[in-house]
Amino acid sequence: MDYSFAINEVDIKYFRDNVENIRRKKSIQTLGQVKWNLTIKYYIHYNVPNKATVKLAIENIQNNTCIRFSRQNSWIKGDYGIHFLFRPPDESEFWGHRPYIREPQYIQGSYNCYQEVLCIQELIHYALGVRSEHTRYDRDKYVKIQEYNINPYKKYIFEKESRVITKRYSTQYDFGSFTHISPTKYSRGGTKEVVTPKHFSEHYKMMMGQKIKVSFNDYKLINKYYCDKNCTGKKLNCRNSGYQDPNNCTRCVCPNGFSGTKCENLTSSDSGCPRSHYDIKNVSLNSGLTGGEFIFFNGTRSCYVNITNQSGNQIKLTMKYLKLYNRDTKKRCIEGQGFQIKYGKDKGSMGLCFCKSYSGHQFDLISETDKVYIHYNGTSGTDGVVIDYGRAN
């Protein structure tokens, strides 16, 4: 029997009864009946074109979570596990392990997918229960789905997840998640826009669909769901959206821009940067301006800045000037490349990122809380950013 194509009657019934749940995969599903144990068996089929890609993807997950994988030398029978197969399309068979029957599930990939570590890793995240960012039940606050432009055969990919069986663990919508699709993926003809950000569309679209790095929250979701009990009795109060490291309970894993055992510190800046902390309490508002002080960034250096409104109210930023050179504008934009503003409540979610010069008129941004974090990463002597800040009205 060719096990790679076998399916039994129990599976057929499950597919018929639960097709919506199977197809929708960033939140993470929380049905206990499909939650994996912390050691997962896997087998790589002999015809997979690049087995090293699978091993590297698994190493990434093991290095950043408490989950471990055990490679098998033959087909897994009578137990949960993952079979990696070489065949299109790129997809995982289930989110979570196979329900109702103790047998492995399949992850299948095309030749191109097996050449990219993050393509395979994304499929493993789905198999662990993670859902694509654009299917979150709160997505309508952040993006608009252009339903008419969707390929009719792919509409199921855009169905929103169930609030009842998923958890977000206080993570906010993350345009920089590597599970987020690009603006035109699964569209009619492949060119029409199907997902449009509701705010700062031009810039968020440059972040969507990136397969350059796994975001902080991509790993955080897995750790909160699978690994939260690893440090029982040794709990740390992690700050700034950090979480306790399941592989070293004495420290927290920190989002970009934060450091310290509990993520209590701002990452140190290079010499020549603006000062690290700005307090709106000490700013006198000028008529017609959002604040009484400008912040200047320039040159080849990495700068981290924290702005706080001591009154507890929101902060208003105005982008006055932004010039960034030597960036590959054809690639997606991620944190650490250019200029990033974290203005949401969740500091683990990628902020608004800029990776190219902005020649449009100045624009305003209102924070969700009384804190804003900024990272400037200049790679050219001619790079420069100027912002104005103050209280939001």
Image (cartoon, rainbow, N blue to C red):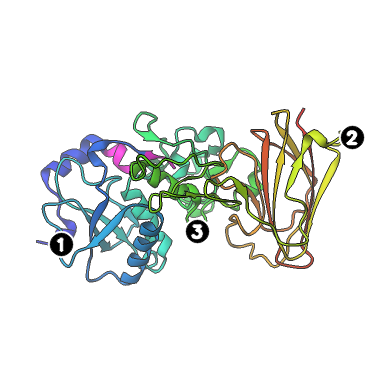
Q: Nearer the viewer, residue 266 or 211?
A: 266
Point 74% across, 57% down: residue: 357
Q: Amino acid at mark 2?
A: Asn
Q: Provide residue 119's location: percent of width, then percent of height.
A: 41, 60
Is residue 20 found inside the magenta-colored segment of the image? yes
**Callout 3 crowding tier (Cα within 10 Å): few <14, some 14–19, many ≥20:** few
Mark yes or no: residue 126 visible. yes
- Distance of mark 1 from mark 3, alpha carbons? 31 Å
Identify the residue under disc 2. Answer: 286
Q: Provide residue 10's location: percent of width, then percent of height.
A: 13, 41
Residue stretch rendered in magenta on the structure: 19-28
* Helix, strand or loop at mark 3: loop
Q: Amino acid at mark 3?
A: Lys
- Distance of mark 1 from mark 2, alpha carbons? 71 Å
Where on the picture, by quarter, is residue 197? top right
Q: Nearer the viewer, residue 375 or 282?
A: 282
Identify the residue under disc 3. Answer: 213
Mark yes or no: residue 24 visible. no
The disc label shown at residue 369, or none: none
